[in-house]
Amino acid sequence: MVLERGRMVKHIEDYPSANLDPWDTENRGAMTPAEIRPQEKQMHAGFISKNEKHFFINDEKHPYEKDKRFDWIRGY
C-alpha cells in the first residue's frame, strides 16, 4: 500500500544527486553510523544513501514502536 503525503516532489529540482556518479560522493554515498542513527528503521529499505536520505523520514522526530519486525518505510 502506498499513502501519499507531503510536498510535491519536483523533477530535477528535488534530485540534487541525479547526475552524480557513485565516486562523486564521499564514501560512494555510504552513510556513517551517526548519519544512520536518525533513520535506522528506514534503512531496512536497503537503498538509502547520502544521496536519497532527504526523501526518508527521521525516525527520531517521527518514532513508531513495533513488537515484531514490520518494515514501514516512510518518505516525504
Image: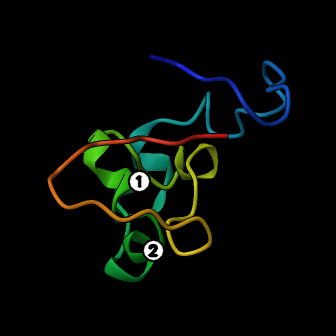
| Location of residue 73 with respect to 30 vertically, above or below | above
Figure quadrant of the C terminus:
top right
Quarter holding the N terminus?
top left
Q: Height in image: 12 above or below 53? A: above
In this orientation, which residue lies closer to the viewer: 73 or 16? Answer: 73
Q: How many marks?
A: 2
Instruction: Check disc 2 and report the residue beneath it.
Output: 35
- Is 13 situated left or right of 41 in this image? right
For label 1, the residue is 29
What secondary structure is found at the residue carrying circle 2? helix
Mark 1, other Cα within 10 Å: few <14 / some 14–19 / many ≥20: some
Could you tell me residue 71's position as x and y percent?
28, 42
Q: Residue at x 31, y 40 (%)?
A: 45
Q: CA distance from mark 1 to mark 2?
A: 11 Å
* Residue 71 falls left or right of residue 2: left
Q: Quadrant of residue 37?
A: bottom left
**Viewer-proximal residue among 60 and 16:** 60
Rendered image quadrant of residue 41: bottom left
CB within 8 Å, label 1 to label 2: no
Q: Secondary structure at mark 1?
A: helix
- The three-letter amino acid code for the residue at tag 2 is Glu
- What residue occupies the far front of the structure in this picture? 67
Q: Position of residue 62 (x, y in %)?
A: 59, 65
Q: Residue at the spot x=68%, y=24% of the render? A: 4
Residue at image point 50% right, 48% down: 24
Q: State left or right for residue 31 relative to residue 46.
A: right
Query: What residue type is disc 1 on?
Result: Gly
